[in-house]
Image (cartoon, rainbow, N blue to C red):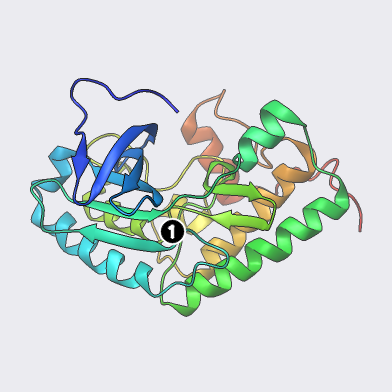
Amino acid sequence: MDGLRPDDPRILGAYRLLGRLGAGGMGRVYLARSDRGRTVAVKLVHRELAGQEEFRRRFRQEVRSARRVGGEWTAPVLDADTEAEVPWVATGYIAGPSLRQVVDRDFGPLPERSVRILGAGLARALQAVHAAGIVHRDLKPSNVLVTLDGPRVIDFGIARALETLADGDGLTRTGAAVGSPGFMSPEQVRGGAITPASDVFCLGSVLAYAATGRMPFGTADSGVHALMFRIAEEQPDLTGVPAA
């Protein structure tokens, strides 16, 4: 966690901000505490997005949908102000490293049994998300938290609001891709209809990464467009994935 910067708010709704957890295409994420002492994660959208009514409409819709998802396998939505000058949403704070941190920095590829447990937990999380009528659209190792009680999925559903800002290159007007190169489905790359099947494809990529420590379609070292071509047209490299 990083400290707050001079341009960061100190209070959002009933939450006192404690520090920065990260930032992304939609906005900044803060660690915060409620007036009752509960620790939460608060996402504040980028100000330039807040001024676009179509984005706000989709953001409202996605927050409503996300509230219906149970918190057993995900971070539950606790509060939101979609009508604020700069909208925000608060979710339960989940203590635990991301799958990316576990594999890339701490331990390397996971044992086969751990990958099976991870896969079962993520499948149940997606089942809950899809049952609420949501497609995650950005399932990737940094959006999977590893906890003592099993994996938790974060940033689900709300990513859809960014698609209202996509141009012909699949990029938002702020330059953030809709989805994450390396963990996108072919239909995301091609700009096709996104269904729950897209999340299942991304789940396969995440599990292959967990088992090998490598992205199954390679990195973007040769360029993002080359990576996207491999996702859309070629088979994944599953070298090192246990045969079972």
- x then y, percent, for residue 178: 37, 47
- x then y, percent, for residue 226: 53, 34
Residue at the spot 71% in from the left edge and 35% down from the top edge? 103
For the C terminus, the quadrant is: bottom right
Q: Secondary structure at mark 1?
A: loop
- x then y, percent, for residue 217: 65, 40
The quadrant in which residue 161 appears is bottom left
Residue at the spot 50% in from the left edge and 40% down from the top edge? 181
Q: Residues within 10 Å of mark 1 (few under 14, many from 20)?
A: many
Instruction: Please indicate, yes or no, whether residue 167 appears anywhere in the rendered image.
Output: no
Amino acid type at image mark 1: Phe
Q: Farthest residue toward the right? A: 243
The residue under label 1 is: 156
Q: Farthest residue toward the front? A: 36
- x then y, percent, for residue 33: 34, 45
The quadrant in which residue 170 appears is top left
